[in-house]
Image: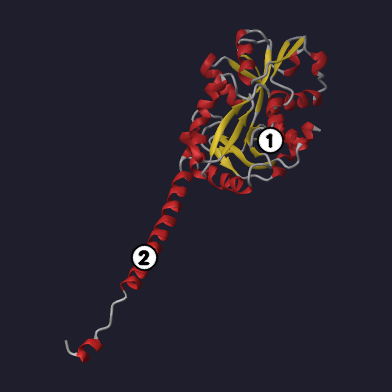
Amino acid sequence: MDDKLKNKIVPQDSSGKNRRWMKIIHSALFVFLILFISSTASGLSNQPEKRSLYYFGIPPHQKGQSIDEIRDLYKPMLKWLGDQVGCRFHFIGADTYEEMIKMITEGKVHLAGLGPVPYVVAKQQNPNIKLLLTELRWDKEKKNSIDSYRGDILALKNRADLKSLWDLKGKKFAFVNHHSTCGYRYPNVLMREKGINPDNFFNKFYFLGSHPRVTDAIAAGSVDAGATWDFNWDQAVKKHGDVFKSILKTPPIPNLTIVAHPSLPDYICFKIQKILPTIDPSLLKGLPTTGFVLRPDSFYDGIRSLVE
């Protein structure tokens, strides 16, 4: 070969070219690995069993059913809410109002559905309890959703001798619980405004623990009359027939609440306030609510006067 031609041939550095390709391959693998880890983590976070778990509690304001029956009624709402918020909500029932107040004030449940008086009492015991939403319900004509309800003192229609509150003197009477708004607090105040002291006005009075037990006792004739709310009256008619009449009706009472313990993260509270009012009413079937609305804490100031 010609010496000049030999001098023009440049030896190829194959090891340098290989190193460049290895760097490209390593970079591509690194990017792929990062994307794989990110997508896997995202997928895991979307799996229900991997979501954060929070507890939702309900007192026995309408618990004529078992805990399992009440849990089944709330299951569609809690499943939907968890999917929307990105967490899980587990139902916890309570046997008494006092037990649920204790659970929410101590953080044993993160969320609770409370009546007006239990909410005010819980707020007194733990000022950091947050009011998230107020429940809505149908008006009597079932045309509009409203943010209040009424309590009633009921007796049987066939009791012609019972026409007014004064006719209950010396009779047997049923309350729900000391912390029940329309099952004790409100009727107690109305009675005392009329000069009636329940402690010595009735022959006997009982605290039966839930609203259905009050209407069950009236229907059975175990008591002559009792205090309850209009939702339970409707439910009792389905069970016992149209056998009840109202002797005394309360003024409108602010509806039940959804409240949060301060341990529930603020961003979860915000999501619940934003999302829960958009729930499809079909997911609330069997519950004493048709939806939810934002109301300020001052909405319950009138209830505070009952507690004080």
User: Which residue type carries mark 2?
Assistant: Met
Image-based side of 169 in relation to 90, left or right: right
- Using the image, tell me which numbered label, if any, was put on residue 28: none
User: Which residue type carries mark 1?
Assistant: Gly
Query: Where's residue 118, x and y in %?
Result: 71, 31
Residue 104 or residue 308, whichever sits in front? 104
Rendered view: 129 above or below 58: below
Rendered view: 172 above or below 100: above
Q: Residues within 10 Å of mark 2 (few under 14, many from 20)?
A: few
Local SS, label 2: helix
Query: Where's residue 235, x and y in %?
Result: 55, 21
State the image quarter where residue 7 is shown.
bottom left
Image-based side of 160 in relation to 275, left or right: right
- Who's the residue at 36% across and 70% down the image? 20
Find the distance from the CA under tag 1 to the CA under tag 2: 56 Å
Residue at the disc numbered 2: 22
- Who's the residue at 49% across and 44% down the image? 84
Residue 186 or residue 121, whichever sits in front? 121
State the image quarter where residue 249 is shown.
top right
- Using the image, tell me which numbered label, if any, was put on residue 107: 1
Q: Residues within 10 Å of mark 1 (few under 14, many from 20)?
A: some
> Where does the N terminus fall, quadrant-wise?
bottom left
